[in-house]
Image (cartoon, rainbow, N blue to C red):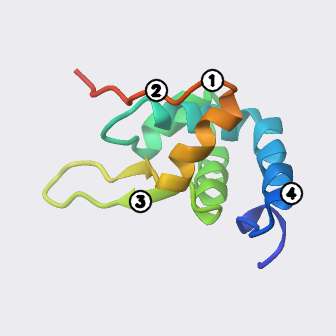
Amino acid sequence: MNEGLWVWPPDPKDQRAMLRNVMRSKHLLQAMVALSKSKEGLSNAEIDDAIVDNSNWMTLWVVRQLTSLGFLNYNVHYFGEAAKYQLTELGKNVIPILTGQPASKPTAKT
């Protein structure tokens, strides 16, 4: 499991190639953009809604890929709130590259 889309490569050339792979996947890109817009992070169901696939398998695949690359953290909330995925610093740093737009501040849910 140390090869493929599961590991963030140390070489900048390989990193650019990895980001191109992420950009080619509409599900990975949609999830990253949705997560970048959320200050508190997104639950599994919210990521499922964001990737507009209605497939728990696809949501699981997206979450595994992005977590393995180091783009996401999984934060468990005790006492009733849903656990949420949030972008790591690496994830926040690659958003402008993936979207081609400058980084924006996440918004809080109302």
**Side of 52 where 107 appears, left or right:** left
Query: Marks 2 and 4, Cα distance to the nearest angstrom?
Result: 26 Å
Picture mark count: 4
N-term-proximal mark, 4 vs 3 = 4
Question: Quick check: marks 1 and 2 in contact, CB under 8 Å?
Answer: yes
Front label number (3 vs 2): 2
Query: Marks 1 and 3, Cα distance to the nearest angstrom?
Result: 26 Å
Q: Say above or below: 14 vs 21.
A: below
Label 4 packing within 10 angstroms: few (<14), some (14-19), many (20+): few
Label 3 packing within 10 angstroms: few (<14), some (14-19), many (20+): some
Residue 105 visible (yes or no): yes
Coordinates of residue 1 in the picture (x, y in percent): 77, 78
Query: Marks 4 and 3, Cα distance to the nearest angstrom?
Result: 28 Å
N-term-proximal mark, 3 vs 2 = 3
Front label number (4 vs 3): 4
Residue 31 visible (yes or no): no
Query: Marks 1 and 2, Cα distance to the nearest angstrom?
Result: 9 Å
Name the residue located 76 percent from the left edge and 67 percent from the top edge. Answer: 9
N-term-proximal mark, 1 vs 3 = 3
Q: Residue furthest left?
A: 79
Q: Say above or below: 110 vs 61.
A: above
**What residue does disc 3 label?**
74
**What residue does disc 1 label?**
101
Q: Residue furthest bottom?
A: 2
**What residue does disc 2 label?**
104
Amino acid type at circle 4 is: Lys
Query: Marks 3 and 2, Cα distance to the nearest angstrom?
Result: 22 Å
Coordinates of residue 50 in the picture (x, y in percent): 54, 29
**What residue does disc 4 label?**
13
Q: Secondary structure at mark 3?
A: strand
